[in-house]
Image (tube, grey):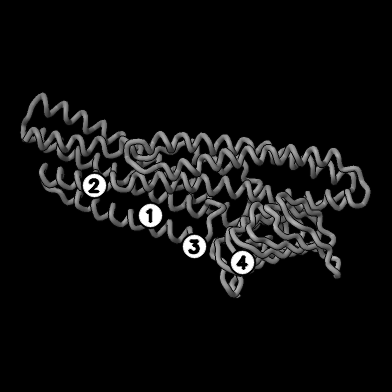
Amino acid sequence: MNAKIGALMVSALMLVAIVPAVGVASNMGTQVATVVRAGAYEDAQENYLLARAALIQVYSEWLSASADFLRARVKWRGNRSDQNLAELVQAGKTATLKACDSIIQYCEMLSFRVEATRGLSDNEKTQLNDEIGSYVTELQAKRVSVQNAEDAQQLRTAAGDLWRYWLQIRLRLKQITAQLMVAYANSVVQRLEAFAGRIGARVQQLKDNGIDTTALDNWLNDFNSKLDSAEQKISDAENRVSQMTDNVTFIDIFRIATIRVIEGISYLKDALSRLRDIVSDMNSKGHTVTLTGSGALIAHGSGSANLSGTGLVWVKAIENGTMIVSPNANVTTNGVGTKENLENGYVEYQGIGSARVTGTDITVTLSGSNIILYADGTGTVTLTGTGTYRTYGENKYANGDWTSVGTTANLATGDASTG
């Protein structure tokens, strides 16, 4: 009997000893929320905060039940009567049920957080919520087994089963939590990139009109430097998420990933402050710039891309590539290649390794393989071939594949359609 009771103690007390705590990362969304405000996400954030408060309450109830369990154990050790044993088993059942409730509530909070996370497509949210829902269903079934246990042996078996299932899913729940942090941070990066694309196009327009833009250029360089630093931190966090592969080290890796995201958010706040300074200065001088309606796209693949709009087109990499741009575009290229002025005024580049194209109402046509493409600002992008893409609109995000019939994305809205 002593061995059985001892096993019950372990199951009841250790089960929630590692229930994911509500840490600092849970509130990161509020730090730069003004960059990506949208009604649907604000509503989801409210639901998430309510679920988070409910988790804190349930966790508090588990702590109280655990304290009662410990007191019952001390009492039973002092007098191992049948009555004290019955009280101990009941206290163990209550503590185990509260442990299960805490895990279920954490899952439900995580599901609300999925809905509140900008940067995830509807498809990604559905997949994550279906996965989390399957965990909740299994946990609820195991909770029933604990509730129905009639003696110490049955309770020990049910609690042990619950404990083993928790060991199966806790790593994955932490992975999802880390993925949500990274997705949100990346969405802020891309929104700021989209704004910068519009501002850069406007600055180039001023420059083409003979206006001195030295100060604006310096501010933009400072903004881009901060944004680069943020991206490096967030990329490091994303890499660490993929390293969360075992039940022994994942907590430490998660902690470091959280720190990296928080550091990235700090750089993003600095970049946002610089962006506001730029817009304020431009508006004060009558150089009005509009940021609403800005979005971004990231695409990797082979085939062709046709872009039209205002902002920045950044070809980070391309092999065996050809790029044709409209005559009003400002182009900077890297790598060995050729440049040819076409009869219609357009300019064709071949054999380039990368390129940055800015301007207002420009068109860019790309073809090649292993293309890594970023588009920031307003307009549309049509991708044809094979590859993947992700959009960051004002309040809509999408991800998917290039197709042979063509996929068209609207930068401003984030919507994408095939055909």
Q: Is residue 392 visible?
A: no
Q: Which mark is residue 132?
A: 1
| Disc nearest the viewer among 1 and 3 | 3
Residue type, mark 2 in image: Leu
Q: Which residue lies at the image location 60% right of the left edge and 60% below the top edge?
A: 396
Q: Nearer the viewer, residue 140 or 35?
A: 35
Counting from the top left corner in percent of width and height, residue 248 is at: 32, 36
| Mark 1 burial class by Cα count in 10 Å: few <14, some 14-19, many 20+ | many
Comparing labels 4 and 1, the label whose residue is closer to the camera: 4
Number of residues whose C-alpha sits closer than 10 Å to that of mark 2, classed few (under 14), some (14–19) or many (20 or more)? many
Q: Earlier in the sequence, mark 4 or mark 1?
A: 1
Disc 3 packing (10 Å; few <14; some 14–19; many ≥20): few
Q: Earlier in the sequence, mark 1 or mark 3?
A: 3
Q: Quadrant of the C terminus?
A: bottom right
Residue furthest to the top in view is: 78
Residue 303 got which mark? 4
Looking at the figure, which quarter contains the N terminus?
top left
Q: Determine whether, in the image, residue 411 is placed left or right of residue 186.
A: right
Q: x, y percentage for residue 351?
A: 70, 58
Is residue 259 at least partly visible in the picture? yes
The label nearer to you, 4 versus 3, is: 4
The answer to whether the residue labelled 4 contacts the one labelled 3, judged by CB atoms less than 8 Å apart, is no
Quadrant of the image occupied by residue 272: top right
Query: Foreground: 121 or 354?
Result: 354
The residue at which mark 2 appears reads as: 162
Tell me the kind of residue under disc 4.
Gly
Residue at left 31%, top 57%? Answer: 137
* C-alpha span from label 4 to label 3: 25 Å
**Residue toward you, 40 or 185:** 185
